[in-house]
Image (cartoon, rainbow, N blue to C red):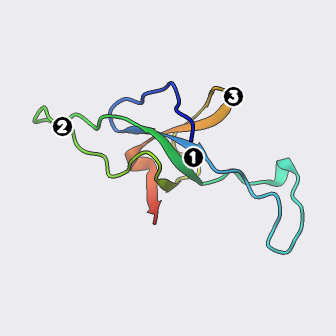
Amino acid sequence: MAKISLRPLDDRVVVQPQEAEEMTAGGIVLPDAAREKPLRGTIVAVGPGKMLDSGNRGELTVAVGDTVIYGRYGGSDIEVDGKEMKILRESDILAKVL
């Protein structure tokens, strides 16, 4: 995993989506237009946590290197160093893959 030159703010994380499947389980090759956007990715950067009313920062429950599942329409798509990335709030993450 390459180090990226991006640091998210508050409770945001940067996720590198996994590649879309090129073939179905039955062996049919899918063209680019038919591939669904991946809903799984690896966290490559995390913010310091959301500022709480007490003045402290809340800890994130995910860390760099975690594989996560996120909502289809959550976050913002960006390009960093020629790679597609997604910036999500921690609340947009549905699950951590163990």
- The residue at the point 66 percent across, 33 percent down is 83
Question: What amino acid type is highlighted by mark number 2?
Answer: Leu
| Secondary structure of residue under mark 1 | loop
Q: Is residue 66 left or right of residue 20?
A: left
**Mark closest to the chain's N terminus, 3 or 1:** 1
Q: In this view, does 48 lie to the left or right of 19?
A: left
Q: In which quarter of the image is residue 8?
A: top left
Rounded to the nearest angstrom, the CA distance separating label 3 from label 1 is 22 Å
Question: What amino acid type is highlighted by mark number 3?
Answer: Gly
**Mark closest to the chain's N terminus, 3 or 2:** 2
Residue for badge 1: 73
Please identify the residue farthest to the left as the structure is shown: 54
- The residue at the point 57 percent across, 46 percent down is 73
Question: What amino acid type is highlighted by mark number 1?
Answer: Tyr
Q: In this view, does 60 lie to the left or right of 18?
A: left
Please identify the residue farthest to the front as the structure is shown: 2
| Secondary structure of residue under mark 2 | loop
Mark 3 vs mark 2, foreground winner is 3
Asked whether 37 or 14 is in front, the reply is 14
Reply above or below: 88 against 35. above
Q: Residue 54: where, in percent of width, then height?
A: 10, 36
Position of the C terminus by quadrant? bottom left
Q: Residue 89: where, in percent of width, then height?
A: 41, 41
Residue for badge 3: 82
Q: Residue 97: where, in percent of width, then height?
A: 48, 63
Q: Quadrant of residue 45?
A: top left
Asked whether 32 or 83 is in front, the reply is 83
Residue for badge 2: 52
**Mark closest to the chain's N terminus, 2 or 1:** 2
- The residue at the point 37 percent across, 50 percent down is 62
Rounded to the nearest angstrom, the CA distance separating label 3 from label 2 is 35 Å
